[in-house]
Amino acid sequence: MQIAVNPDGTITRPEVPLVPPSSAAGAAISRDVPLDASLGTYLRLFLPNPAPIAKLPIVLFFHGGGFVLFSSATVFYHAHCEAMAAAVPCLVASLHYRLAPEHRLPAAYDDAASALAWILGGAAKADPWVAAHGDLSRCYVMGSSCGGNMAFFAGLRLRVDSPSSAGAVRGLLLHQPYFGGEERTPSEARSEDDAMLPLEANDKLWSLALPEGADRDHEFCNPTKAMAPAALAGLPRCLVTGSRGDPLIDKGREFARWLAEQGGVEVVTRTEHEGSHAAELFVPERAHELFAAMREFMTAADGA
């Protein structure tokens, strides 16, 4: 993962290009909206260009990176949200949240809850793009990898933090959700290709992200073991997507079954796509498959 843990406990991250929001002609335009200046959090909004006449669903998006890496301004996540806004189409609000280990969990969850409160609590109505083009009655919470983990916990908190607004969230879109638990040994890995490196990378990322002293069976990492199914009552409809070549796919399928069978959540699964973890960021065909699954799920929710 090219993450160096320094003696003082700080880390050195790999250098990945960041890009500013863009108003240039293209499939989508973007701009940044401050969320909490004291924490350095913001939302990068993406709008199809040109915007359709009809109001658009709003997708609150949480990027991946194991809670430790990347940003809404990271070049490939910026491009992914541009493509999503144009293809679905939708108004995307991509959250720049605090990273671990400087800000261990639940800091990212708190930032996700603040972003959702911005959308559902009335502040978004004052934003010109949301006011002109967004349908605040059709909101979706989406995340990729650790962002999928965040979207799940945002859905749980919504019922407590803002029960009167919960109905505006039509669903959770959990793409390759990042969960763990006691890891497989290399002999239990699905192939030689996904044996040692993912195990080592997952161990490092979770050790940096979880609260101090927590193990891999903490509910943030392993809710299927640590969380009572009753805690899932009232969770919005969920789409769980993944790829056969992803080392996380078995855990993702287990999580989807747990939601449906133990929690009684309505779950749509699309976990048979080709590709590897995060392939949609770099392979257009994988992105098109994901966007098609999103459209199908959102159309069904809008017709319910």
Image (cartoon, rainbow, N blue to C red):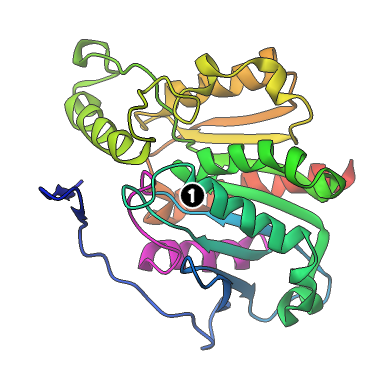
Q: In the drawing, does residue 179 fall left or right of residue 238?
A: left
Q: Residue 221, how many percent across, how many down?
A: 44, 28
Q: Nearer the viewer, residue 32 or 226?
A: 226
- In this view, which residue lies farthest toward the bottom? 24
Quadrant showing the C terminus: top right
Question: What residue is shown at x 34% (from left), y 16% (from top)?
Answer: 182
Q: Residue 116: x percent and y percent?
A: 67, 55
Q: Is residue 145 visible?
A: no
Magenta extent: 65-89
Residue at 59 percent across and 72 percent down: it is: 46
Is 105 left, or right, of 227 in this rendering?
left
Q: Residue at x 57, y 39 (%)?
A: 174
The image quadrant of residue 178 is: top left
- Looking at the rendered structure, the kind of residue marked 1 is Ala
- The residue carrying mark 1 is 108
State the SS at label 1: helix
Residue shown at 21% from the left, 57% from the top: 13
